[in-house]
Amino acid sequence: QLVNKMALLVRLTACGRSGFLRQTCIIKPTSQAIAFSKPNLNSLVKMAIPMSTQQLKAEAEMAEFWKRNVEIKKRPLSPHLTVYKPELTSMLSICFRICGIAMSVSVALMSCTLLALPHDFPHYVAVLKDLQLPSSAYYGMKMFLCWPLIYHGMNGSRHLAWDAVWGFGLKTLYKSGWTVFALSFIIAATVASLPWK
């Protein structure tokens, strides 16, 4: 009862602040609008829908919903990768994020490591050359370093085009996605094939 009176008081206060509670104010405690004057507040409180009853009903409905969907039907709580078929757009987005995170972490770790090591970077490149590994191993290492950087840069340009509200059509999304994917491999392969200096 106290909760109901307080809820009504909050409604009336809001109504009074906006200038409607001079003599009369109209609110909807039930499905019908009721006009009342200041002496009729007690009768209005008795007619108001109990807030606690509505809250209990909502909580019961929510509990029933979760029981039906999670416990009985074994549905997942939210969509995830095992539910949806992989699409080009989602895979490019995931790859874009992974490349960005991997490059950020790699640059930070490599910088800290090089600061802690006794020699500078060219010394370690010379050591790597002196290992006399097969050319395919060197090519693979260079490709591993080049492709994420090139892909992230190209797909970032695609995102900038979206910021300019260009390329949101489904056909355009797929064309630009395949173009970025293919060109990033071609450019990375070209850069990786350049000889050591």
Image (cartoon, helix red, strand yellow):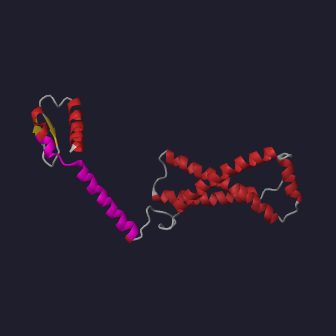
Residue 117 colored in magenta in the image: no
Q: Provide residue 11's location: percent of width, then percent of height.
A: 22, 38
When asked about the image quadrant of residue 62, the answer is bottom left
When asked about the image quadrant of residue 77, the answer is bottom left
**In the drawing, does residue 51 fall left or right of residue 101?**
left
Q: Provide residue 33's location: percent of width, then percent of height.
A: 13, 43
**In the drawing, does residue 179 fall left or right of residue 7?**
right
Give the number of callouts. 0
Work out whether 144 lies above or below 38: below
Q: Which residues are magenta?
A: 43-71
Whether residue 48 is visible to the viewer of this picture, yes or no, is: yes
Whether residue 197 is visible to the viewer of this picture, yes or no, is: no
Work out whether 166 lies above or below 74: above
Q: Provide residue 156's location: percent of width, then percent of height.
A: 58, 49
Q: Nearer the viewer, residue 40 or 109?
A: 40
Q: Provide residue 126's location: percent of width, then percent of height.
A: 87, 53
Kindly report the secondary structure that dominates the magenta region of the rendered protein: helix
Q: Nearer the viewer, residue 14 or 93?
A: 14
Q: Nearer the viewer, residue 66 or 138?
A: 66
